[in-house]
Amino acid sequence: MHESQESGATAKGTAAQLEQARRAKLDRLVSLGIDPWGKRFDGGLPMAEVRTRGDALDKAAEDGPTVRVAGRIMLLRSAGSLVFIDLHDRTGRIQIMLGKKQVGPDAWKIVDCLDLGDIIGIDGRLGWSKTGEMTVFASGIEFLTKSLETPPDKYHGLVDADLRQRMRYLDLIHGEGVRDRFVARSRIVEAVRRVLADRGYLEVEGPTLQESAGGAAARPFKTHHNALDMPLVLRIALELHLKRLLVGGMERVFELGRVYRNEGVSPRHNPEFTMLEAYEAYGDYGTMMDLTEAILVATAQAAGTPTRFEWMGHTVDLTPPFRRAKYDDLLREVTGCDPEDPASVAAAAAQHGIETANRHPDVVKSDLFEATVEKTLSGPVFVIDYPAAVCPLTKRKAGHPHVAERFELYVAGIELANAYTELNDPDLQEELFRTQLAGLAADESMARMDTDFIKALRHGMPPAGGLGIGIDRLVMFLTAAPSIRDVILFPIHRPRADA
RNA sequence: GGGGCCGUAGCUCAGUUGGUUAGAGCAUCGGACUUUUAAUCCGUUGGUCCUGGGUUCGAGUCCCAGCGGCCCCA
């Protein structure tokens, strides 16, 4: 304490004292000629593999194999000149026993400098302790990295949701199942790519900086290019550029990438999130249903999700084929209105407090559907055949100009996928881009003129099916996560005044 | 944008109707311990009670505003 006052670094407050104690140990390591930041450490076995070997050992035997492991100190129990450590790596944990006699006086000086959170490498004999715990009985220790910060409570870990997201690295170390969930996310994305690759799809990358944001109904983030002195927006969807590639003869394309929507934050919304969009020439929305089922089955398997499970209070069974239900039929069942009759729909909407005056009937209908039907859909269910006016990028059903060949896949009341038979008539597309629906704010409208896209369509886009899947929601669903922030490593946050 | 709940030590949490010097566990530091496993035992350090106002003899506690978080609704 007195030393620190002399050096001007007064240890005021617990945090400073805790750090000072760690820095003292760091200094001791340096004085022992040890680099507290370590170096390359080859030949370490993953803990999971060590455990597999340990399980095969006779528990009384004292001639187990020599193993080398590396990891972070999560627990440290000192019994005099005997120290037990729980060492963790990405694959699991194992107990290390360090004895003063066993490791010798030089190594013991290192053991004296260990704190929770430090990273070390250990050589030792694999065996079982007297109390029946698989243990590496250390013969040597290599110091690899000092931790200057105090880890969270070793039993409770980090609980505060804010801290967990701002300091995700700590959450990954200490949070129950946190790393597993992000491992699952990686496996899910891998599976998506595999399904598409197996079907001959090419993965491509469209521009994230665009002149105008199309392909969805959302407000974009605005930015500016200095050298070109032009305003730009971040993309809100992948659709319009992928369809240009269909024109270009890339008949099966997909993009798996980040999109940005300048809107509210909620348990199901983050301003940046990951979308999959896939387009298949010569297909339609039925083709996309098959693809969606294949992706759901493959990703569930990759994530280790059972076929039948509970999520958000809904029971879900992922055995294909998924149920298909017509939009109008669901609306009729749930609300009792006549979907074909705008007056009947408006009356039902009014009962739910939905504004009906001066609004396009399909907008009202869409609001009514969202307010009443969506939450009842345990799913998985393909809701098919949407009111055409709210689908400006979708081909109309042959002989039914007011019905769009669109489906949304619902699971547990949440929209997981959205697909169309793609509109490829350039004249109709141009007209729909021009048509602003009454009662729909520009921000909420997909109708935004994109003359370059129209030009592309005029060169001929083959009939096609297109599919969009929200990867974050898919991961939420398959890992039973209640919030999108549980599946995004670094979700958006307001800055904090202190830290 | 509206409503509800929350913010106390590095972490996890108590804190009664407003009442003496704000507590515990973990972590830290010192001590005992060669079979522990959230080790145990003895001792020890550590506080902008989110911030700013207000009410009061007296505020962690009540009121107002702000900041931050979680949830619900639009």
Image (cartoon, rainbow, N blue to C red):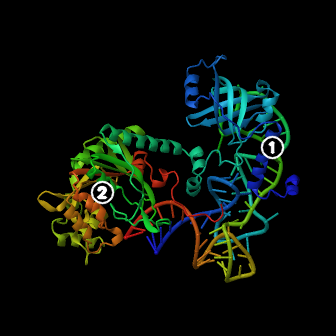
Residue at image x 34%, y 47%?
Answer: A254
Q: Is residue A173 above or below residue A387?
A: above
Q: Chain of mark 2?
A: A
Q: Are marks 2 and 1 on the same chain?
A: yes
Say whether residue A132 is visible: yes
In-image side of A10 versus A322 (left or right)? right
The amino acid type of the residue labelled 1 equals Asp
Residue at image x 37%, y 48%?
Answer: A204
Q: Which mark is residue A376?
A: 2
The amino acid type of the residue labelled 2 equals Thr
Give the residue pinned by disc 1: A27
Q: Residues within 10 Å of mark 2 (few under 14, many from 20)?
A: some
Q: Residues within 10 Å of mark 1 (few under 14, many from 20)?
A: some
Residue at image x 44%, y 53%?
Answer: A482
> Please, what secondary structure does the residue beneath circle 1 have?
helix
The answer to which quarter of the image holds residue A207 is: bottom left
Q: Nearer the viewer, residue A282 or A111?
A: A282
